[in-house]
Amino acid sequence: MEFPLVAERRHVIGRADDASRWAPDIDLDACHGLDLGVGRRHAEVWWEQGRWYIQDLDSVNHTFVNHRVLAKMTPHPLNDSDEIRLGRLILSFHSA
């Protein structure tokens, strides 16, 4: 499954919540996000100064890039083919 990103905006990654009517920009429900520990507002990805960044949005189950846990609310640069893990859900980042 692919999730295209638009450089002109920030993308919240997480899971939808019908009770609060919350829907993230990238909804990982179809990828078993709930079972794999993805939070409703787990992480955010955006383009800035010529590169993509990700940051953990204070998630319970953490965000990892290439097996390294990210500090909460701290931007981390992304490179092509980086492995992103949200909880136990593994994604691959591709910039083109």
Image (cartoon, rainbow, N blue to C red):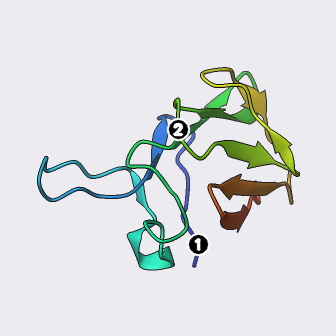
Name the mark on residue 59. 2
Where residue 61 appears, as percent x and y from the top left, is 59, 47
Where residue 16 appears, as percent x and y from the top left, is 29, 58
Q: Residue 79: in sight, yes or no?
A: no
Q: Is residue 46 left or right of residue 81?
A: left
In 3D space, how far apart are the residues under numbered discs 2 and 1 (Cα atoms)? 22 Å
Q: If the image is split into quadrants, where does the C terminus sit?
A: bottom right
Residue at 70% from the left image edge and 66% from the top image edge: 90
Where residue 17 appears, as percent x and y from the top left, is 23, 56
Q: Is residue 62 left or right of residue 60?
A: right
Instruction: Name the foreground residue: 4 vs 30.
Output: 30
Which residue corresponds to mark 1? 2
Comparing labels 2 and 1, the label whose residue is closer to the camera: 2
Residue at 50% from the left image edge and 76% from the top image edge: 31
Q: Is residue 10 left or right of residue 91?
A: left
Position of residue 49 relative to residue 67, above or below, is above
Q: As shown in the figure, which amino acid type bears the numbered disc 1?
A: Glu
Compare marks 2 and 1 and give the one earlier in the sequence. 1
Residue at 38% from the left image edge and 51% from the top image edge: 25
Q: As shown in the figure, which amino acid type bears the numbered disc 2?
A: Ser
SS at badge 1 = loop
Q: Quadrant of residue 50?
A: top right
Position of residue 26 relative to residue 64, above or below, is below
Disc 2 residue crowd, few under 14, some 14–19, many 20+, Cα 10 Å: some
SS at badge 2 = loop
Disc 1 residue crowd, few under 14, some 14–19, many 20+, Cα 10 Å: few
Where residue 12 appears, as percent x and y from the top left, is 45, 42
Name the mark on residue 18. none
Q: If the image is split into quadrants, where does the N terminus sit?
A: bottom right
Q: Is residue 67 left or right of residue 56?
A: right
